[in-house]
Image: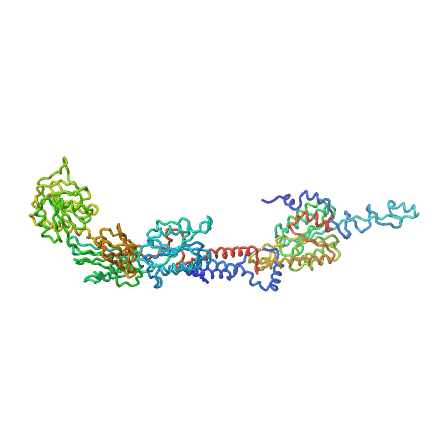
């Protein structure tokens, strides 16, 4: 029985959870200039209530911003300068390759939920949210969205995304970087199981333009496989086959390799100024959002 | 060291030939791998690659299960083959050794050794395993039981006792031996052993062929039954022998022999008859094929039909024997016969006797006296009743002096205790056969003619009886009497046996009849004399079973010599000569005559000059050892004496196959490999 639109949206974000997310905001460690006035301090000096600096009065300046206290002391006219409140660009790069259509709980749904939560936080705080679906390049994109009124549209977009196809992280990141020049917070949600490697792709995202946040999400079946016997493993993305006889040493080696892989990704990210977070779909996603992401400084 | 042997080697071999290749084939055929979807093979391939570089035993990893399954299969195949080891059961601390030394234990079917020798050897071997503080007793049994050595812990004495046991030709009975064993064991040091003391063990060495197997029970002792003997022992034995003098022609003796084959296959034998040690003409019957007793009727009939065989079950002989003799029957030409005791039997045939006849008559009887003069009698006497009464003061002497006493119209008041009597117009005193009385006088029947007679009776055969009896008694005939001649009004001639006496009653006075004028009368009288004199010995002298103690009446001893104080008994070679003292009064029982053969008494005792002892027992001649312990309880040990077969298959399954199965299950579920 097809679930209704509301039910599907509820699967991603429930009303109760949204209420909890209202308290949060996306934090950028770097103040980044936005295009419009948002609820974000910007480095630009503009009109706001937050005092930034003084300058000498010049004929024609707005007399309301003269600091009369200084004039009284120094008998000179100075103008108060205030920080401009700008919007923050929040980019969410969501992995929708076929490899995410795996696991229990399913990785794709988990990623969508995290994306929905982050997107909601960004929208309700008048940040400009863009969600890009990555597979073999950027396969879908919302474009910039602001304000709470865009939440439904965002959820619709996420619901319609279906994991499919093989991944090409490098191409996706390249295209993203080319089309999104405004600086902002970039959150990459993926398993990073890209046979072409993750370095080429992440290179486009690191380097200072974005406040990079990488969340690698795997399912328990990938972290601690329960396979046994003599098997023929079929890659869900590209159909690649591997004949294995599951043994204890093999499992041990696999886990060691997985661990090393994740550490390598983390190392790559952190060296380039980004933040890395590893999560399992077994962790309740609200815990991830409300606890882990706050601890890591993405949300506050 | 006892190496195991296998009870089912071929079955296990066949199963192994099928199962082992099948198991290997399952493993070495190309594996069918199950296809499983994973999110990415990226890290799996790397793991495989890394593992193949690092692990030296990876080739063996999937073979661990194969190895374990092979071990399980081998354990099950080994259990299927039913390996057994013989292990020696030790003798406990209180044991009774029962050794069977009956006739069947003389069979030499254990590599030429007799069963008794085998039993003795095994018993001595078992004594070596006795607890060092243990005690044992040795009892030899056949149809009785003798304690050879009472409880002792001296093994040398016990072994000596066992060695001293000699074979007999007697039958086997175990009841007395069991009772003796339990009684002696119970009474042996009860205060030391206490109620919780060791249970006495009875170590029985026998072939199990006991007559009283169904009556046996042990109350508290444990029975260890050592079966001695083989099932393949061949034996044809004489199981029955009888000889009769022909009633019609007392000089002719008929001998009947019944044979039985207790071996597994048909066997031939020859039967030889000898008289006083000489084989008579016609006294050999050869080529008698005897079917095995263990065959069913169907098997016998099938063999007779398919192989055109004719099976014999015995032989019979006829010979003329005017004198007494020892007739000996022997089996000859027997291949593989292992028991000699039943291959011969003898029978003592006394001579037909010249009779001493007494006629008691008040007034004399012309016809009877004439008959006595003309008949072939030893020394006939005639006596008046008073003289008879006088003689009756010593009835034993009277009985011994005369073979037949005739009472002519005289009703005797008493008779000797045993004898043969003929009455003419009189009846035996105090007997069921009496004359009808009326007003205290016998009823008289007048004018009778012969109505019918027993034409087949030896006394009356071929005698056309037609006579007239003027007067006679009306006889009241008891049911166990035989009417030989029936008159038209009353029985005329009646034969009645009463205990040790035989009475032939003619209800009429022969002098008052027409019979003496007929030729049938003297013929009848002659036959009657012979019948009365020889009939009690028509079946010849009885033979005795081995172990019997024939009782000789004092009267017979006195006949031999009035003051006999000792007697020599000459027996077969295995018995030898034994001198025994005779008690001063009463009857005398001979010592047990344990061996088969003819025993001669010295001095000769009338009616006991020679005594024949024959086995004639099909239970003893049947050499097939019994598998079940006599009485049905107890443990049977292997014929290898004192050793018990211990089957290992249960231990292999319990401690081999099952633990391996558990390990294999664990390995499979835990994915543990080399």
Where does residue B579 sit, x and y in percent of width and height?
28, 58
The front one of B445 and B606 is B606
Tell me, yes or no, if residue B5 can be seen here: yes
Instruction: Specify the farthest residue to the right.
Output: A75
Where does residue B649 sit, x and y in percent of width and height?
46, 57
Instruction: Specify the farthest residue to the front.
Output: B563
Tell me, yes or no, if residue B646 can be seen here: no
Taking the image as shown, residue B450 lies to the left or right of residue B620, namely: left
Residue B228 falls in which quadrant of the image? bottom left
The front one of B406 and B474 is B406
Q: Compared with residue B104, is residue B220 higher up or lower down, i.e. above or below?
A: above
Which residue sits at x=70%, y=43%? A19
Where does residue B429 sit, x and y in percent of width and height?
17, 42
Taking the image as shown, residue B667 lies to the left or right of residue A278, namely: left
The front one of B401 and B277 is B401
Q: Quadrant of the N terminus of chain A?
A: top right
Q: What colour scheme was applied to this rendering of the protein?
A: rainbow
Where does residue A105 sit, x and y in percent of width and height?
62, 50
Residue B349 falls in which quadrant of the image? bottom left
Instruction: Specify the farthest residue to the top.
Output: B439
């Amino acid at each position: 029985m097809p679930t209704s639109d509301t039910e599907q949206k509820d699967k991603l974000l429930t009303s109760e959870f949204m209420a909890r997310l209202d308290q949060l905001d996306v934090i950028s460690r770097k103040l980044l200039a936005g295009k419009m006035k948002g609820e974000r301090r910007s480095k630009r000096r503009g009109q706001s209530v937050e005092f930034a600096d003084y300058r000498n009065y010049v004929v024609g300046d707005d007399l309301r911003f003269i600091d009369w206290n200084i004039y009284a002391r120094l008998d000179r006219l100075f103008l108060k300068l205030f920080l401009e409140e700008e919007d923050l660009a929040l980019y969410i790069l969501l992995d929708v390759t076929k490899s995410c259509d795996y696991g229990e709980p399913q990785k794709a749904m988990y990623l969508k939920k995290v994306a929905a939560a982050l997107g909601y936080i960004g929208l309700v705080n008048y940040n400009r949210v863009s969600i890009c679906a990555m597979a073999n390049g950027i396969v879908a994109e919302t474009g910039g969205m602001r304000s709470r009124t865009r939440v439904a549209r965002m959820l619709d977009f996420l619901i319609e995304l279906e994991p499919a196809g093989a991944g090409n992280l490098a191409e996706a990141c390249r295209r993203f970087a080319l089309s999104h020049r405004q600086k902002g917070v970039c959150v990459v949600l993926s398993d990073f199981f890209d046979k072409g490697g993750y370095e080429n792709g992440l290179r486009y995202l690191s380097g200072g333009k974005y406040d990079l946040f990488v969340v690698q999400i795997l399912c328990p079946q990938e972290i601690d496989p329960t396979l046994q016997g003599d098997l023929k493993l079929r890659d869900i993305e590209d159909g690649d086959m591997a004949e294995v006889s599951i043994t204890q040493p093999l499992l041990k080696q696999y886990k060691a390799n997985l661990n090393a892989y994740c550490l390598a990704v983390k190392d790559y990210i952190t060296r380039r100024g980004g933040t890395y977070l590893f999560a399992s779909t077994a962790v309740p996603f609200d815990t991830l959002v409300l606890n882990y992401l706050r601890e890591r400084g993405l949300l506050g | 060291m006892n190496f195991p042997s296998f009870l089912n080697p071929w079955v296990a071999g066949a199963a192994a030939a099928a199962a082992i290749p099948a198991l290997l084939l399952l493993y070495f055929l190309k594996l069918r791998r199950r296809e499983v979807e994973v999110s990415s093979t990226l890290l799996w391939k790397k793991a495989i690659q890394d593992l193949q570089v690092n692990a030296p035993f990876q080739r063996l990893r999937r073979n661990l299960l194969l190895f374990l399954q092979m071990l399980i299969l081998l354990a099950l195949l080994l259990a299927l083959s039913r390996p057994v080891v013989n292990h020696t059961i030790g003798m406990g601390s209180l044991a009774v050794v029962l050794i069977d030394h009956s006739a069947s234990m003389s069979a030499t079917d254990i590599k030429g050794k007799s069963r008794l020798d085998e039993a003795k050897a095994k018993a001595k071997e078992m004594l070596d395993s006795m607890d060092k503080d243990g005690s044992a007793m040795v009892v030899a049994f056949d149809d009785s039981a003798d304690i050879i050595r009472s409880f002792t812990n001296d093994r040398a004495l016990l072994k000596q006792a066992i060695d001293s046991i000699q074979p007999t030709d007697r039958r086997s009975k175990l009841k007395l031996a069991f009772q003796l064993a339990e009684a002696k064991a119970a009474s042996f040091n009860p205060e030391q052993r206490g109620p919780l003391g060791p249970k006495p063990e009875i170590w029985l060495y026998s072939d199990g062929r006991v007559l009283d197997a169904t009556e046996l029970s042990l109350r508290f002792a444990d029975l260890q039954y050592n079966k001695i003997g083989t099932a393949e022992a061949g034996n044809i034995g004489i199981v029955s022998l009888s000889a009769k003098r022909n009633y019609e022609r007392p000089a002719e003796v008929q001998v009947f022999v019944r044979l039985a084959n207790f071996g597994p296959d048909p066997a031939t034998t020859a039967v030889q008859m000898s008289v006083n040690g000489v084989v008579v003409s016609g006294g050999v019957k050869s080529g008698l094929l005897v079917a095995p007793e263990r065959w069913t009727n169907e098997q016998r009939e099938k063999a007779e039909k398919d192989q055109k065989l004719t099976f014999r079950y015995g032989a019979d002989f006829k010979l003329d024997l005017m004198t007494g003799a020892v007739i000996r029957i022997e089996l000859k030409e027997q291949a593989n016969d292992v028991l000699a005791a039943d291959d011969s039997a003898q029978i003592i045939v006394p001579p037909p006797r010249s009779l001493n006849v007494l006629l008691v008559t008040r007034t004399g009887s012309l016809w009877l006296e004439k008959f006595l003069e003309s008949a072939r009698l030893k020394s006939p006497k005639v006596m008046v009743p008073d003289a008879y009464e006088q003689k009756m003061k010593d009835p034993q002497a009277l009985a011994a002096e005369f073979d037949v006493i005739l009472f002519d119209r005289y009703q005797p008041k008493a008779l000797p205790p045993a004898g043969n009597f003929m009455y003419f117009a009189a009846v035996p005193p105090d007997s069921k056969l009496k004359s009808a009385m009326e007003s205290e006088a016998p009823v008289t029947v007048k004018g009778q003619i012969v109505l019918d007679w027993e034409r087949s009776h030896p006394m009356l055969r071929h005698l056309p009886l037609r006579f007239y009896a003027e007067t006679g008694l009306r006889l009241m005939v008891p049911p166990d009497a035989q009417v030989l001649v029936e008159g038209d009004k009353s029985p005329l001639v009646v034969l009645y046996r009463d205990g040790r006496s035989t009475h032939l009653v003619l209800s009429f006075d022969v002098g008052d009849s027409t019979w003496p004028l007929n030729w049938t009368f003297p013929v009848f009288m002659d036959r009657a004399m012979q019948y009365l004199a020889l009939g009690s010995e028509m079946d010849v002298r009885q033979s005795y079973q081995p172990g019997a103690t024939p009782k000789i009446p004092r009267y017979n001893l006195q006949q031999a010599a009035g003051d006999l104080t000792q007697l020599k008994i000459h027996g077969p070679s295995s018995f030898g000569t034994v001198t025994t003292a005779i008690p001063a009064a009463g009857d005398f029982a001979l010592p047990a005559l344990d061996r088969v053969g003819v025993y001669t008494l010295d001095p000769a005792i009338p009616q006991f000059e020679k005594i024949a002892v024959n086995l004639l027992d099909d239970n003893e001649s049947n050499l097939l050892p019994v598998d079940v312990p006599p009485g049905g309880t107890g443990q049977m040990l292997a014929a290898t004496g004192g050793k018990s077969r211990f089957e290992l298959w249960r231990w292999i399954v319990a401690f081999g196959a099952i633990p391996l199965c558990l390990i294999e299950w664990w390995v499979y579920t835990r994915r543990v490999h080399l």
